[in-house]
Each structure stands twice: as structure tokens, then as C-alpha cells.
Image (cartoon, coloured by chain):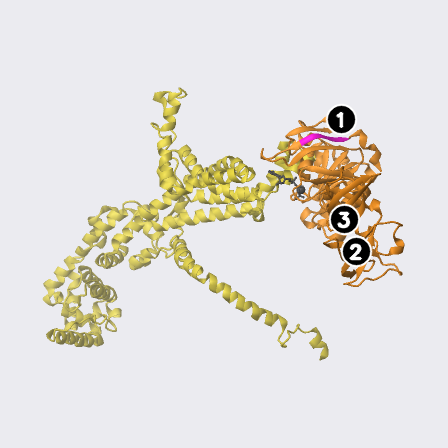
Amino acid sequence: MTETTQDGPMLAADGTPLKKSLRRALRAQKLRALGLIAPLLIFVLISFVAPIVDMLFRSVENQIVSDTLPRTVVALRDWDGEGGEAPGDEIFKALTYDFIVAAERKEHTRLGSRLNYEMTGISSLFRKSGRRVDDIGEDYLDQFKDLNDAWEEPATWVAMMASEGWVADQVAWSEARAAAKSADQDFETPEPAFALRPGVAKALPETADIYSAFARTIQTQDEDSPTEEEPWNPVYMALFNDLASNPDAASAFSGDVAALLSEAAAAVGNFETISPKDAFLDADEDWGDPMVWSTIKAFAPSYTSGYFLSAVDLQLTASGVQPQDEDQQIYMLLFKRTLFMSLMIMFSCILLGYPIAFLLSNLPMRQSSLLLILVLLPFWTSLLVRTSSWKVLLQQQGVINDILVWIGLVADDNRLVMINNQFGTIVAMTHILLPFMILPLYSVMKTIPPSYVRAAKSLGATDWTAFWRVYFPQSVPGIGAGCILVFILAIGYYITPELVGGTTGTFISNRIAYHISSSLNWGLAAALGTILLAVVLILYWVYDRIVGIDNVSLG
Amino acid sequence: MPTDSKADGFVVFDHVQKSYDGDTLVVKDLNLNIGKGEFLTMLGPSGSGKTTCLMMLAGFETATHGEILLDGKPINNIAPHKRGIGMVFQNYALFPHMTVAENLAFPLEVRKMGKSVREEKVQRALDMVQMGSFGGRRPAQLSGGQQQRIALARALVFEPELVLMDEPLGALDKQLREHMQFEIKRIADNLGITVVYVTHDQTEALTMSDRVAVFDDGRIQQLAPPDQLYEKPENSFVAQFIGENNTLEGVVESIKDGTALVKLDNGELIDTVPVNVSAAGERTKVSIRPERVEYNKERLQEGAHTLKAEVLEFIYMGDIFRTRLRVAGNEDFVVKTRNAPDQVRLKPGETIEIGWLPEDCRALDA
Ligand SMILES: Nc1ncnc2c1ncn2[C@@H]1O[C@H](COP(=O)(O)OP(=O)(O)OP(=O)(O)O)[C@@H](O)[C@H]1O
Ligand SMILES: [Mg+2]
């Protein structure tokens, strides 16, 4: 056994294994470090990481369709959309039920706006239909009423649909409310949630479904009670449908309700039927457009690639992924333009910034600190002011054109267009981002001892060779850091292209901002943002492979 | 070796002055003749203008006044890269992004030499500094001493006739420094190159050089071979700066037959060699090397002047004894004696008499 102790782990002075006691000692250190960064960590997590994760989630999230039109989505599963025909009555019936609930909950306009991103016109179609959907089934109501006035009474419906437990609870609740009222007390408790009578769902499935939706909606939405409200008209359509398909439904009931139902069941055969499809088509002809239906079907799943497809100029239809209409293809162009212009900006920053940084690091202290202040000067003025001043300089009646005309380089009637295009954006952004190139370059160059260049010269190198073979390679880490900074800042820049970019000089970020704040298509904005993030990460990776991220230094 | 060849003036500084700011002269009237194949060291305290001189020679600074000649030709207007001077920098200045072999090949490449010639020369230079197998490494993967050798090899690989070295051993520890001193000296002698070497380490200067130029305050204070510099300092700065030195202050009483009689500040008289004094009545600093002071009467010459001294401290240092005395009011008077079997070991508090040969005692400027 002595052997094992010798081969076993090293022991600390107190006999615990050395590794363990080391780990214990380190844990205290780690905890302290964690405590120090905790405030920042929490701040970043709450205010930065969580929103970003949420945004990324939004780029695929699509529950609104299946939440708002649950019955329609299920019914559409078997519809293949082939043949260019709108679906039949079955699906319109489901749509009627979904729509009345959505309209009463005022959710149909939200869904309309959402689907409008995919197909223009759906928003107004939904809004219009929302106003008309309550009319569907009115004819059934009239026919049931003609049969027996009791059908109009809320009490009849409660007796037929509600569970006995709920009725008892409801009575107790309304008594408590009355008592409170007479005692002049506040009574905040809501009415007990409506509960369906057992067996109804089997005897009258559609009616049970839509009636309980009705009860819950008025309870939560309007704080009304099913005991006082007459059901929506489509409920009568459901009752008609149920009785037509199950004439024996009354057997599941007893008393007055059973009598009423068997009377109605006997009569429905002679009812005048109404097609929900015709009713919708009557409200808006667009319901006959199979494109509307294929859009709804395509976006029925809870998660969709639709936003990402739109973000790369593709579209999702019921029959698969297709390219976006020619005149709506804009994002790939914008991505390419953003990349191209960011690279242009990056290169002009290198060209302009390198000599300055070189000068900065080689001038005597006094001059170099003055120059450094000049480099930092732009940071002291607002970004908007700087961008706007470029407008003043570059516009057709602006300072630069005036000077060019004055010295005769440019004809007065042929002034240069230098703003509201790519040129303007590149000029203004180069100016704004230049310090981000100069500073890392400067801090790296400052660490290159002058003796290297001297050594190179003493070894026989000309000024140029000494610079190119000895100085430049050592400044590459600074260029790398500057490039990464400038490029990443440029690729996501928004204000400057917005102000001076016109139509040809805008970036993808301007489009993202538009979708965030104007069109409110956050899903698409999130998808565009995600793609932008991915592009940056890929470029970063490529950079790492080619240049090596160790070769980046801030000094 | 080449002290005799200094007259041919391979490198000549002719009344060279240098000012950086237009207010002060960093180099004041520098005149210097360096012979071909000579190993000349510039020695001096910090800020005395050594590096500046080297930089002017290499072409990185221009002389404000005067001329610098290389092999008889003025080089003031020749660009640094055309001067063909090898240079070893204090921090080595090895290019960090190149391997050792690439560093060495650089001067050959800019001279447009073919690849095979280059490789051969690089290998030869590496072998010369005994670093033959290190060609593939980066400078950062070498120790200080190895980097130093590579810097030396790089300065020599293109076979310059003149090599400048600015405190090349400054960053090394004592042992390595001594080793490298020997190596540099050996290589320089083997190749027969002219070396201008800058240091502020006097031992280094004395052990390596053919001649040493002692700089102070922008001037050469003395230019002489090491032994002369040590034994016959020409002014009190050199006497103080080189080696250990005892100074006694006084006034010249008379100068006669190559001997100056000096009256020390406490009234005692001593015989000295007049170096920087010309007339009676001048103040002077008298300089005696610690190892030339004798207190063993039997070893003193007949008629030598003696002074009273009180022993303050006796330090046993193995090979020598170092005794600190109070002499003529100076409490830092040091005597070094060889640890011989018959040598007396003094005790603090003892009063003794000390003396020296008059020719070891030099009356210098005050
Ligand atoms: N580039 C410069 N600009 C202004 N003054 C300088 C410059 N270089 C050196 N000096 C000044 O010139 C004087 C001599 O400097 P130099 O570098 O020649 O000294 P040195 O003898 O090499 O000293 P050290 O032993 O410390 O290297 C110093 O006073 C220094 O302050
Ligand atoms: Mg120096």
C-alpha cells in the first residue's frame, strides 16, 4: 500500500490533495473576480444580450398565425392549393369561427399587418372582413328565432352549454356582487371562468367550441357575462351545422333544452342554408384569391424561415421557396453595397490614416500631442453636426462646388453631384471613422523602436526598403486592429448613410431601421440583423485564417 | 596591434560639432583619427555624446559643423545606407518578424546578391558566432546573449570595413558580458575590421580596446591606449573616471627638473609629476592610484616623501587588502596591498606612515 501513496496525488501540508487545495484557493479568487465583474455582467446580460437573443428569436418566431387562426390552420393542412382555386366551405367555416373570435379580440388587424409583409393587400382584406364577419350566421339566428323566441335568450344558451358547477358558482358570485353593491363595497372578483357542460362537446362539437370561445372572450374582453349576452351570430351557424349532422343531439340533454333542441333538429332540414364562403367573398372578393390562402398556409407554422428568405430576396409560398418578384429584390443588393462601401471606407481610412499615424508616432512629443488632439477633434463635435457639415460642403450649391466653379474646373451648369450618393457616404464616413483607424495604428507604431529602421538602413536598405521590409510588417497588427474596428463600425452604420446617402448610398442598416421603426416588420429586421451579424463573424473568421487574430494589437 | 597605423586616418572627425536644439552643443569640437583595423572605444558618462558621435558617423544625425571623413572621403552628404558601415545597436534591433537567417540575409538581399551566395554567407556568419543551428528561429526565441551574437553576425555578414557598436553588451549579465567581450575582440581581430565601440563600462573599455577615447561634456578628455589611460591620466576627470583613484588637494610650491613640489592643504609637502600644472601658486589635484601607495617602509625608496595616516577601516578581500585611511584631511584615501605572506594587517585606529614613488603621483588640474 506504500506504493499507492507514493504514486498517488501530491499532498499539501495539511494532508489534502494538492490539486484540491489549489482549486479551493483559486475558487476564492475566482469568486472575488466574479463579484467584481458581476454588476457589469448583469447589466450587459439584461440590457444587451437578452434583447439581442430576443431579436434573433423574432427572426424565426411566427406564432401569430396559428394563435389567431387555429381552426383555419388545421383545416388548411389538407388543402394543397393546386389548381389555382380558393378552398371550399369547410375551410371558410373554420375561418368564420377564427375570425369572429379574432375580431372580437381585435387581433385580426395585427395578423393582417403581419401577413401584409408577405402579401400586400391582406391587411385591408382582414380589416374589412373583421367588420363584416359578425353578419355571417345572422340568417340562422333569424330562422332559429322564428322557430322559438327562446333561442334569443342568453339563459337558454347557458342552460344548454354551461356545466352545473359553473352555474352554481356564477349564482353565488352574482349574489356576492349584489350584497357588496348594497353594502356599497368594491367588488373586484371577476366572474368565474366559463366551463362547458360535459357531453356537449360530443353532441354539438362546433357549437361547444365556438360558444365557449364566445363566453371566454366576452368575459375577459368586455367583462360581460354569458348569462346576459346573446351569442354571436356565427354560433347559430355552428348550431345549425351540428344539428344538421347530428339530428339526435337532443338525446344528450334533458328538460326544456332537450325539447328545444329536438324541435330545432326537426326543423333544420327546412332551413335556408348560407355558404360562409359566399359570405366572405361578399365581404371582399380577395378571399377567392388562392394566393391569399397559400400565404396563410405558408406562414401557418410556429417557426418560419420566411423572414430570412425575404432577407435574401426569396419568398415562401405554399408551393415552396421562390425568388422574390424582380421589382422587390432589394436586400441582396443592399448587402453587397454595404460590404462594398464598408471595404471602400476601410481602404480609404488606411490610405489617409497610415501617414498620419506614422507622423504622429515619429514627431517630437510637442507636435505629436498637438496632432493627436487634431485627430481627436472630430470626437468633440456631434456626429450629426459633422455629417451635416459634409452636406454643406458637398451639395451642388455647396462650398466645394462653388470653389470648383470659381476656379473654372467645373461649369456652373454642370456642378458635380457629390452628395446623396455613394460618393457622399464614403467621404463622410471615412472622415467619421478615420480616428478609429489612426488610434490603433498610432499605438502600435509608437511601440516600434526607431532603431529597427536605422538598423535596416545601416545594413544597406534604402528608405523605401527599410520602410517596406522592416517598418511596415511591424505596423500590420495596427492595420488589422484598425481595419476590424472601422469595418465593423461601418457595416452597421446608420445615421450618416441616412443623412447623406440618398437612395444609392444607403446601407442595409438603414433598411433595418426602417423595418424597426416604420414598417414595424421586426421579424424581417431581426433576420437582416442576424445575417449582418453572421457576415461579420464570417469575415472575422476569414480574417483570422488569413492574417491571424494574434496579429491584431491595440499597442 | 594597430596603434601605429592610426596616422592613416581611416575614420577622421575634423572639428565636428553637434547641437540638437540650437542652444547647447552636445559635441564640442571633436577631433579624432581612427586607424584602419583599430579597435577604438568611446568611454564616458551618460549623456556625454558618445551615441551622438556614433550616429553622426553612421549617418543618422548630421554634424552641425565640421567634417567626417571615411577612408579619406567626406561622408556628410552620403545617405546612411550607402556608407557601408555595420552597426550593432544597444537593443540589438533584430527584426522581430524575420527569422535569424532572414535577418542575416537582409543586408545581402538589399545588395542584390544571389540566393546561393546569400545562404553561404549567412551560414558562415552564423558559424562565426557559433550559432550555426539557430537560423530558423525568431529573435524572440533567443536568449539575450544569443541575440547579441546574431546582431553582431548581421553587422558583419556584408563584410563592412567599419563596424560601430553602441553599448552592445549593456543588457547582459556580468559573466556573459565578459565572455562576449572576448568573442567580439577575437572576431574583430580575425577579420581585421575597424571597430568603434561605445560603452560606459571602463573595464570593458580597458580590456578590449587598442585605444580609448574618454568623453565628457562633449569633448574627448583623453585619447590613449588603456595602460597609458590608467597610469598616466592627463586630467583629474580621467583619473577619477578610470579605475580607483586617490585625490589630495593642494597648491604648487615650485616646479623643477620635471618634479613639482606640492603643498597640501594641511601644510605637508609632497613630490609629484607635473601634468596639468605649469607654474607655482596654481591649485592642483594630486592623483595616486591605491595600489601604488606603500606603508611598508622597507619597500619605499630612499628619500621618498611620507605622510601620516590614520587607519579607519581594514577590509580583507582575499587576494588583496583594502585599507581606508585618513590622509591630509581626506577620509576616503584607499590603499590596496597584495596579500603577501609578509604583509602587515593594519588595525583601525593605528597611525602609520605612507609613501609612494614621485612618478606615481601626478599633479593634475584642480
Ligand atoms: N534626438 C535628440 N534630441 C535632443 N537632444 C538629444 C537627442 N539625442 C541626444 N540628445 C542629448 O544629447 C546629449 C548626448 O546624448 P548621447 O545620446 O550622445 O549620450 P551618450 O553619451 O550616448 O549617453 P549614454 O551613455 O547614456 O547612452 C544628451 O544630453 C542628450 O540629452
Ligand atoms: Mg548612448
User: Distance from label 2 to label 3 (Cα)?
Assistant: 25 Å
Which secondary structure, mark 2? strand
Residue A378 in the image: state x and y as whole percent.
42, 40
Query: In the image, what residue occupies the spot 47% across and 61% down?
Result: A37
Query: Any mark on residue B72, and which?
Result: 1
- Of the numbered discs 2 and 3, the one sitting upstream in the chain is 3
Q: Of A92 and A488, which appears nearest the observer?
A: A488
Quarter of the view holding residue A547 = top right
Q: Nearer the viewer, mark 2 or mark 3?
A: 2
Same chain under badges 3 and 1? The reply is: yes
How crowded is the residue under tag 2: few (<14 C-alpha within 10 Å), some, or many (20+)?
Answer: some
Q: Magenta stretch: give its range.
A: B10-16
Same chain under badges 1 and 2? The reply is: yes
Query: In the image, what residue occupies the spot 69% across and 77% down?
Result: A5
Tell me which chain appears yellow: A
Q: Can see residue B133? A: no
Query: Any mark on residue B308, and which?
Result: 2
Give the residue type at disc 2: Lys
